[in-house]
Image (spheres, grey):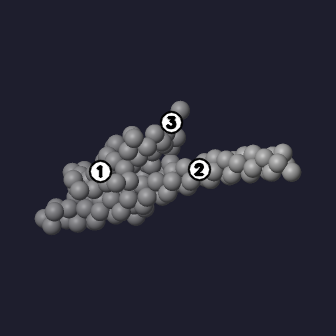
Amino acid sequence: MGTQQLLLVVLGIFVVSVAIALASGLFGTHAEEAAKDNIASECVTIGQLAQQYYAKEREMGGGSKSFVGWEISSHLDSTSSGIYTISARNNTQLILVGKPHPSKGYNWIVQSVITKNNILSNILYSN
């Protein structure tokens, strides 16, 4: 009877170890997907601010149908989710890049193309 009990204990420890390893992997995947969602959402929020600037006349502090001159406000360029920069802009569109903090070790960015009527976000992976 002692050998069977020892075998069951070893088998139980093995099953629990495998379950913990699988759960840890799933949690890491979920955390990365949540980070992508948060950064994409913040890119949309920042993009909406750029669209407001585009629509306002210069006399009211806007761009008068241009994204040139618009900057990300200092309290939005770095959040708990990521770091945001403008990679390109002209009169008709602005390209915003959201990167996760380097400490996360993720190999992707969110790139949002903002025009007067649309915000299109894509996740781009680096090798």
Percent of width and height locating residue 71: 23, 52
Percent of width and height locating residue 79: 31, 54
The residue closer to the viewer here, 11 or 115, is 11
Q: Which residue is at the far front?
A: 2
Residue under the image location 36 percent in, 63 percent down:
45
Q: Classify 102 as above or below 77.
A: above
In three-dimensional space, the C-alpha distance between marks 3 and 1, rounded to whole angstroms, equals 21 Å
Label 2 vs 1, first from the N-terminus: 2
Label 2 vs 3, first from the N-terminus: 2
In three-dimensional space, the C-alpha distance between marks 2 and 3, rounded to whole angstroms, equals 24 Å
Percent of width and height locating residue 55: 27, 65
Q: Classify 37 as above or below 2.
A: below
* Crowd rating for badge 3 (residues with CA inside 10 Å; few <14, some 14–19, many 20+): few
SS for dot 2: helix
Residue where numbered disc 1 is placed: 78
SS for dot 3: loop
Q: Classify 37 as above or below 7.
A: below
Residue where numbered disc 2 is placed: 24
